[in-house]
Image (cartoon, rainbow, N blue to C red):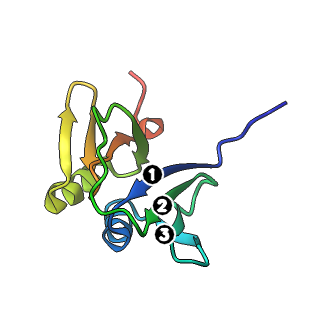
């Protein structure tokens, strides 16, 4: 028996704001959408155009307050092929929430408070 990653899901309060953020910050684009017949929810699947893994955004019509993410100890990680350019973009967007220069990584925060780890493409770095 073998299992393969398919997607991660997060719930979002403002779907359009989240779609804009994920497009601008990470270049993720909508690849499919499912809307409930009664309008109670919308599922939007985003992809990076490179891997088969997707991020599912769930919007619930009856949600009246932003989500409480607790201690927010979970995150999704992305490898940046141009780490410096990514850092500059995210700094300009004002979404960097934590940097660990010793580890060479940083985190950005989406409109709902989810943390996304940005990692340099270490396969492009020379071995010492």
Marks 1 and 3 in Cβ contact (< 8 Å): no
Q: Is residue 98 left or right of residue 79?
A: left
Label 1 and label 3: CA atoms lie apart by 16 Å
Disc number for residue 10: 1
How far across and how far down the image is residue 120, in percent? 36, 41
Do we see residue 110 in this rendering?
no
Q: In which quarter of the view is residue 34 placed?
A: bottom right
Q: Residue at x 18, y 43 (%)?
A: 97
Residue at (27, 42) in percent of width and height: 107
Q: Residues within 10 Å of mark 3 (few under 14, many from 20)?
A: some
Residue 29, numbered circle:
3
Numbered label tally: 3
Q: Residues within 10 Å of mark 2 (few under 14, many from 20)?
A: many
Look at discs 3 and 2 and give the one toward the viewer.
2
Check disc 1 and report its element: helix, strand or loop: strand
**Tag 2 residue:** 58
Q: Position of residue 127 (x, y in %)?
A: 42, 25
Q: Are marks 1 and 2 in contact (CB under 8 Å)?
A: yes
């Amino acid at each position: 028996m073998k299992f393969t990653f398919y997607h991660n899901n997060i719930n979002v309060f403002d779907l359009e704001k989240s779609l804009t953020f994920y497009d601008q910050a990470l270049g993720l684009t909508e690849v499919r959408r499912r809307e409930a017949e009664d309008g109670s929810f919308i599922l939007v699947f985003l992809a990076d155009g490179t891997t088969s893994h997707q991020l599912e955004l769930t919007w619930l019509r009856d949600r009246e307050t932003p989500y409480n993410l607790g201690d927010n100890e979970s995150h999704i990680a992305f490898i940046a092929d141009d780490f410096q350019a990514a850092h500059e973009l995210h700094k300009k967007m004002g979404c960097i929430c934590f940097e660990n220069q010793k580890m060479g990584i940083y985190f950005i925060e989406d409109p709902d408070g989810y943390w996304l780890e940005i990692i340099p493409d270490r396969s492009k770095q020379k071995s010492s």
